[in-house]
Amino acid sequence: MQIFDDVLDSFFLYSKNALNLEYSDIPTPAGVFKNIHLIEDANNPLARISEALCPGHKVLLNFIRKSPLNQKEPNYIHSDIDMGDYTVLFYLNNKYPDNEGTIFYERTATKKLKAEDIEDCSDSSQFKESVIVRMRKNRIIVFPAALYHSRALIENFEIDGEPRLVQVLFLVKK
Ligand SMILES: [Fe+2]
């Protein structure tokens, strides 16, 4: 996993623009993605940075999700393995609740898992928290899509008129 802070010199503008984009519910192979803005520009700065951080990989999907307070979203433990090889998250808010972030897990199961258990993340007793990456403005995190993770806060939030805003990129081998 890689974490970098102060990624964009133009963060203030980038974040302000992101707030004013159009957002809608978009169907994907992994289900409907709620309230997102798809970015198809290969020159998007986060697309270029992500590809530089994952040599030999290219961006498959790039979007920003806007999550106002009370918007219902899943918060289960999952991996992004169906979406690509690497996941990139870029935190776009200026302020965050102290306990917001992304939690990574390792399995606690000692018995040998059957193939059909691998993607069954509904039993949280099978996982223990391994790493918590706190959200921070202008921070990017890059991790193998196979890592199990979840959001730290179930609820969405809005601070000083800014709803939760995260840019998500999935990368696959070229
Ligand atoms: Fe994910």
Image (tube, rainbow, N blue to C red):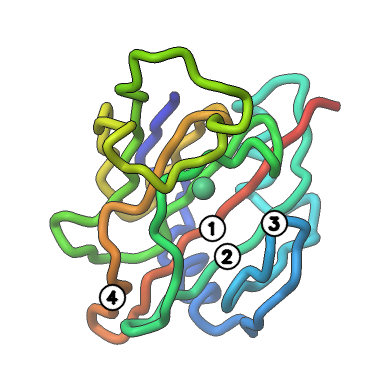
Residue highlighted by disc 1: 167
For the residues labelled 4 and 2, say whether their Cβ atoms are less than 8 Å apart: no
| Residue 124: x %, y % from top left | 31, 42
The residue positioned 31% from the left and 32% from the top of the image is: 127
Mark 4 highlights which residue?
Answer: 157
| Count of picture labels | 4
Between the residue at mark 1 and the residue at mark 3, the CA separation in whole angstroms equals: 17 Å
Badge nearest the viewer, 3 or 4:
3
Residue 6: horizontal and vertical position, in percent? Answer: 37, 43
The mark that comes first in sequence, 1 or 4, is 4
Nearer to us: label 4 or label 2: 4
Q: Are marks 2 and 1 in contact (CB under 8 Å)?
A: yes
Tag 3 secondary structure: loop
| C-alpha separation, residue under disc 2 versus residue under disc 3 | 16 Å
Q: Which residue is mark 2?
A: 64
Foreground: disc 2 or disc 3:
3
Under 8 Å from ligand 1: the CB of mark 2? no
Give me the C-alpha separation between circle 2 and circle 1.
4 Å
Disc 3 target residue: 30
Q: Is residue 72 left or right of residue 137?
A: right
